[in-house]
Amino acid sequence: MTQTEATDMRDASAKAQTLIEALPYFQRYAGRSFVVKYGGNAMGDDDAAREFAEDVVLLKAVGINPVVVHGGGPQIGAMLEKLGVETRFVDGLRVTDKATAEVAEMVLSGAINKAIVGSIARAGGKAVGLSGKDGNLVTARKVKRTTKDPESNIEKVLDLGFVGEPSEIDTTIIETATAAGMIPVIAPIGSGEDGHTYNINADTMAGALAAALGAARLLLLTDVDGVLDKAGKLLTDLTPADIARLREDGTISGGMIPKLETCVSAVEAGCEAAVVLDGRVPHAMLLEFFTARGAGTLISAP
């Protein structure tokens, strides 16, 4: 055997070993749903988008039912600027008047949604683009926020316009699509009982769907490794009680707080576990699901 042949044999053996290591996870998750929130920097990078699509198609191929929920905040902002529509934020949520809501629906349910569907198709999968309005998937209610006036200390109600949160979920259309071999790709838009269209935070939407589906996993792809301790070390396993303690002592702060609130809510409402992981890492989802070491921070009930 030549040196080249020996090297090829070692590489093939390593690949076979990887598949053997993954086998118990294939068996454990077969037929279960994984809800993946996809957004951020990965959506604007062609290579990252291709790798994400490949991962989703592989999950479907091994018997898992991936459900993709996508964001699109930067793209909405760019379109609003292009159209000359003023925008502002309160507590990280875009104040959404009727014009902004129409732009958000156009961008989310249109260009972004179909781009993801196309990427999955190029990777060999079959995806269907949906929004929360399709099949009565998500009924939304208006989000209410309050703030304290720093001078009078009086609480005031903030009107965020057409910003919503899920109040009811009907998973029929997701179950129908997955049973037909399709991968649902869902834009975070919902209809209210008042007939209005509401823009919903993508993390919140993904968490609500994961709970309603009794998903095996909720994945929030971010631009950090996961939850870090005060020394910058990754915390790999957390419970809701751990998260409450880390929030109280200041370890968890800023934008990680609402993400972890979403994870805790999903886990407490029926999702088996949630994971916060770095979506910029090539094939991060596969490393999380199919290796003993995993990736990111896993949140589960004790």
Image (spheres, rainbow, N blue to C red):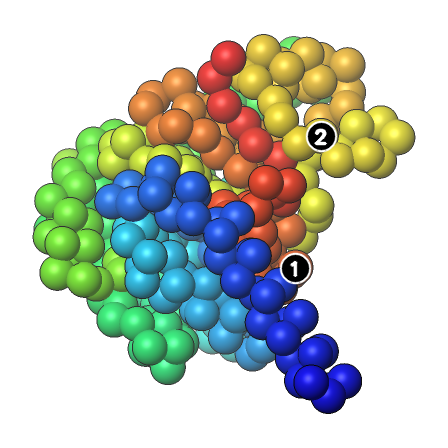
Neighbor class of circle 1 (other Cα within 10 Å; few <14, some 14-19, many 20+) is: some
Q: Who's the residue at 53% across and 38% down the image?
A: 275
| Lower sequence index among marks 1 and 2 | 2
- Determine which residue is flagged by label 1: 281
Indicate the quadrant where residue 232 lies.
Answer: top right
Q: For the residue marked with disc 1, what is the amino acid?
A: Val
Indicate the quadrant where residue 106 lies.
Answer: bottom left
Q: Who's the residue at 62% across and 35% down the image?
A: 297
Q: Position of residue 15 (x, y in %)?
A: 57, 65
Q: What SS does tag 2 mark?
A: loop
Q: Tell me, for residue 235, which label it has, or none.
A: 2
Q: Tell me, for residue 202, which label it has, or none.
A: none
Query: How many numbered badges does the structure rendering display?
Result: 2
Q: Position of residue 276 (x, y in %)?
A: 58, 40
Q: For the residue marked with disc 2, what is the amino acid?
A: Leu
Q: Position of residue 94 (x, y in %)?
A: 50, 48
In the image: residue 179, left or right of residue 299: left
Q: Who's the residue at 19% across and 50% down the image?
A: 174
Q: Who's the residue at 85% across and 27% down the image?
A: 230
